[in-house]
Amino acid sequence: MEVEDKRPSRNLLLTNLAPLMVDKTMAAQLCSMSVATYDKYARQKLLPPMNVTGRISVEALRQAVFRLDGVVQGFADDADAALARWEAEHGGG
């Protein structure tokens, strides 16, 4: 009698993950623009340049696109200031 393995395979788990870094072609597609347009905005420092491996962090790209769209981030980079703001809003501390 053969026992079936009920554990998910490693490949199945990895297929559900979004990539952390992408190449220039994929970065341009995520921004809905051509590679040439991506290069133009990267030269103007409006979009992040590729690193030495020719890739860019999806998070850095997301933040740059938000800045281009004028979206203000809800939390400051300073974790202590963000915590103080949260405590003031929620009565903590």
Image (cartoon, rainbow, N blue to C red):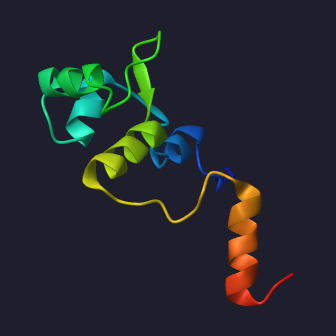
Q: State the image quarter where residue 84 is shown.
A: bottom right
- Residue 2 placement, left or right of 48: right
The residue at 14%/36% (across/down) is 33
Kindly give the residue lying farthest to the bottom in the view shown: 91
Q: Position of residue 28 (x, y in %)?
A: 23, 32
Judge whether 6 appears above or below 86 on screen.
above
Please give the count of numbered marks on the rendered protein.
0
Judge whether 21 appears above or below 7 on screen.
above
Q: State the image quarter where residue 22 is shown.
A: top left
Q: Position of residue 45 (x, y in %)?
A: 33, 27
The residue at 28%/46% (across/down) is 68
The residue at 42%/46% (across/down) is 63
- Between 71 and 50, the residue placed more toward the observer is 71
- Residue 19 placement, left or right of 90: left
Q: Quadrant of the C terminus?
A: bottom right
- Between 74 and 31, the residue placed more toward the observer is 74
- Between 23 and 86, the residue placed more toward the observer is 86
- Residue 76 placement, left or right of 48: right
Q: State the image quarter where residue 82 is shown.
A: bottom right
Kindly give the residue lying farthest to the right in the view shown: 93
The residue at 35%/59% (across/down) is 71
Judge whether 93 appears above or below 18 on screen.
below
